[in-house]
Image (tube, grey):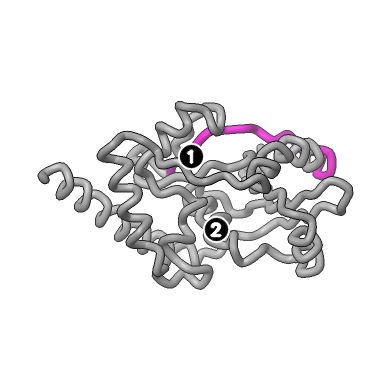
Amino acid sequence: MHVINCEQLSPEWFTAKCGTPSASGFDKIVTSKCEPSKQAEKYLYQLAGERITGIKEETHQTPAMARGVEMESEAKDLFRMIKEVEVKEVGLCYPDEDKRYLCSPDGILASSQGLEIKCPLLHTQVKYLLDNKLPTDYVQQVQGSMLVTGFQSWYFMSYYPGMPPLVIELPRDDGFCAKLKVELDMFCDQLDELETKLRRL
């Protein structure tokens, strides 16, 4: 694993992410069943465009998303207290020096485990608590992060102030990760080819 230690959401962080498939976007490459996603072409074009312009395309941040970012630090402190562990903050992780794809964990534990934190709206937090499992929307991100880092387990935490937190430890799904790696390698090959084609125009 190759790690870049920079502050998340900093200019350096955005520059490093520019044009590179990230675990938070793996759902645009494969579905939660690791089948090809219908969003793959659009994501391919976006990343190719970022490589050409050198600018990470900004995504619209809703008030709920902004609130989630603000709550993350509070949630992380609660996680540290609940699990009685240290959580190291990192910028970006790549599987190797080639840096073809990446993940940006909300934290890394000394036990070689990662942490993903979500701070959803109240009604969503209630649903997550009742379901008591990893929400389907985040299967690709969590398993993809384990593929990138090589870790065998990952914590998912969902937090809303005043509500019980949802904290789940998830094992690596080797079958899913193997299929995901195949799809990611093909996607990255296509991305390289598209970038080359665009630079020749």
Q: Amino acid at mark 1?
A: Cys
Compared with residue 121, is residue 63 higher up or lower down, i.e. above or below? Answer: above
Determine the secondary structure under disc 1: strand
Look at the image and say whether residue 90 sits in the magenta stretch. Answer: yes
Determine the secondary structure under disc 2: helix
Viewer-proximal residue among 56 and 88: 56
Question: If the image is split into quadrants, where does the C terminus sit?
Answer: top left
Which residue is found at the position 35% from the left and 45% from the top?
100
Which residue matches tag 1? 93
Mark 1: few/some/many CA within 10 Å (<14, 14-19, 20+): many
Farthest left residue? 200
Q: Amino acid at mark 2?
A: Gln
In the rendered image, residue 2, in percent from the top left (x then y), is placed at: 44, 36
Compared with residue 74, is residue 165 higher up or lower down, i.e. above or below? Answer: below
Which quarter of the figure has residue 152? Answer: bottom right
Residue 143: mark: 2
Q: Which residues are magenta?
A: 81-94
Compared with residue 13, is residue 150 higher up or lower down, i.e. above or below? Answer: below
In the rendered image, residue 129, in percent from the top left (x then y), is placed at: 80, 63
Left or right placement of residue 161 versus residue 143 in this view: right
In the rendered image, residue 26, in percent from the top left (x then y), is placed at: 46, 57
Which residue is found at the position 43% from the left and 62% from the top?
180
Farthest right residue? 162
Which residue is found at the position 84% from the left and 46% from the top?
161
Left or right placement of residue 1 versus residue 201 in this view: right
In the rendered image, residue 192, in percent from the top left (x then y), is placed at: 23, 49
Look at the image and say whether residue 18 sits in the magenta stretch. Answer: no
**Gap between marks 2 and 1 measured at Cα:** 14 Å
Left or right placement of residue 183 versus residue 153 in this view: left
Which residue is found at the position 76% from the left and 69% from the top?
131
